[in-house]
């Protein structure tokens, strides 16, 4: 089922810390959706003291016949019963102003998530829930910092092409935990210059503490720290500049493919030897490149900004990600065109080249 159908986001926010503590999609507002949110809260934060909710029948049921009512809240719903067993109080209200924090967060998600899902090719409700869990997990992020993390999926530029790689997200989160006093603007500046091997080689995450002890917690101190990162980045980049020169030895491959490999070395910091371990035979690459051109001619859809799927699979292998069993091209018109090779054929081609 495609994402274009209407869905409902179930959301929970901790009022004290202004933190999103649970989120789940379902096709409509359901007991199951709220159970999933409750499960996330229990697993990551423990038992809550109280929930403040709206007057949905999931939380509160009142008999339609006044003569049969035994109390204001005369029937325990399944959700309320579960809360009672755990000692969690529930306060319901129909006034949206009384739930200002969660109403604001709902508005933020409605305005941002659709674009994020499009950018990350999220088309099913299962993928959407997986995305939220991967981003939220059991991590603590205040709302503004969470928005900063989400915004990186729409960001471009910087010396490296790793803005939303898992290693980058994890690295920035560790810095966020180490220096909770850093503003989102400061984190964004570090993010722009971050790549894992550089920060590990020169221990740049810890160096900031030395700068603060030496120069004090001032704006000028942070500017010196950024300059230090840039300096070390320039020094570190030289080894990859030299490695990139080896790409000229790939004489059987197209100029476009060689430029792609060069960018993996210069902007993602893979060594030439590591990259060549993930490259299939030139014949497979050239056939895939020609196939992409055929799709353009056949459909009259310009796909010049689209990389051949074989290029993408090289990058995925380098990142340790799983490959599609049957690689394919997709277009906004609904087109799906399978590649000229399977996952197994791609991997076998790499082995043949290595031998």
Image (spheres, grey):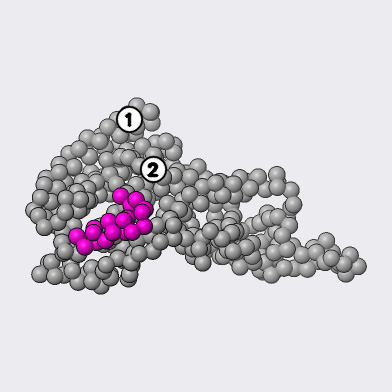
Residue 205 rendering spot, x and y as whole percentages? 31, 44
Q: Tell me: residue 7, above or below residue 262.
A: below
Residue 160, given in percent of the width and then of the height, sits at 27, 44
Which residue is more in the foreground, 309 or 117? 309
- Stretch in magenta: 286-304
Mark 2: which secondary structure?
Answer: loop
Q: Quadrant of residue 39?
A: bottom right
Q: Is residue 18 left or right of residue 278?
A: right
Residue 93 percent across, percent down from the top left: 74, 52
Q: Quadrant of residue 181?
A: top left
Q: In this rendering, would 106 be left or right of 123? A: right
Residue carrying label 2: 155
**Residue sticking out furthest to the right:** 67
| Label 1 vs 2, first from the N-terminus | 2
Between 142 and 107, the one nearer to me in the picture? 107
Query: Between residues 177 and 19, which one lies in front from this camera angle?
Result: 19
Q: Which mark is residue 223?
A: 1
Q: Residue 288 colored magenta?
A: yes
Residue at x 35% of width, y 64% of height? 337
Q: Quadrant of the C terminus?
A: bottom left
Q: Mark 1 vs mark 2: give the one in front.
A: 2
Q: Tell me what residue is drawn at x 12 percent, y 67 percent.
A: 354
* Residue 318 at x, y percent in the picture: 25, 59
Tell me if I can see residue 79 in this picture.
Answer: yes
Packing grade of label 1 (10 A; few <14, some 14-19, many >=20) is few
* Apparent side of residue 229 relative to residue 137 in the rendered image (left or right): left
Q: Which quadrant of the view contains residue 10?
A: bottom right
Tell me the crowding category of disc 2: few under 14, some 14 to 19, or many 20 or more residues within 10 angstroms, Cα based. few
């Amino acid at each position: 089922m495609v994402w274009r159908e209407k869905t409902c986001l179930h959301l929970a926010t901790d009022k004290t810390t202004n933190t999103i503590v649970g989120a789940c999609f379902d096709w409509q507002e359901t007991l199951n959706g709220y159970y999933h949110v409750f499960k996330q809260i229990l697993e990551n934060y423990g038992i809550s003291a109280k929930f403040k909710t709206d007057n949905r029948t999931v939380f509160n049921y009142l008999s339609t016949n006044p003569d049969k009512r035994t109390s204001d809240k005369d029937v325990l719903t399944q959700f309320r019963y579960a809360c009672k067993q755990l000692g969690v109080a529930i306060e319901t209200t129909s006034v949206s102003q009384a739930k200002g924090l969660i109403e604001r967060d709902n508005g933020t998600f409605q305005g941002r998530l659709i674009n994020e899902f499009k950018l990350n090719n999220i088309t099913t409700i299962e993928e959407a829930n997986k995305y939220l869990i991967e981003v939220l997990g059991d991590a603590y992020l205040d709302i503004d910092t969470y928005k900063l993390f989400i915004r990186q999926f729409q960001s471009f530029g910087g010396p490296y092409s790793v803005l939303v790689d898992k290693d980058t997200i994890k690295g920035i989160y560790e810095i966020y935990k180490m220096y909770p006093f850093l503003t989102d603007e400061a984190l964004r500046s570090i993010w722009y210059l971050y790549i894992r091997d550089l920060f590990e080689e020169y221990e740049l995450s810890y160096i900031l503490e030395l700068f603060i002890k030496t120069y004090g917690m001032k704006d000028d101190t942070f500017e010196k720290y950024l300059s230090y990162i840039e300096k070390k980045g320039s020094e570190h980049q030289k080894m990859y500049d030299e490695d990139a020169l080896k790409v000229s030895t790939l004489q059987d491959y197209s100029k476009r493919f060689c430029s792609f490999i060069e960018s993996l070395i210069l902007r993602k910091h893979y060594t030439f030897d590591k990259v060549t371990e993930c490259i299939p035979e030139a014949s497979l690459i050239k056939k895939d490149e020609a196939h992409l051109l055929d799709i353009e001619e056949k459909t009259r859809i310009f796909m010049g900004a689209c990389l051949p799927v074989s290029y993408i699979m090289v990058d995925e292998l380098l990142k340790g990600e799983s490959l599609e069993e049957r690689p394919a091209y997709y277009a906004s018109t609904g087109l799906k065109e399978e590649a000229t090779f399977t996952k197994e054929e791609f991997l076998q081609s790499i082995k043949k080249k290595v031998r």
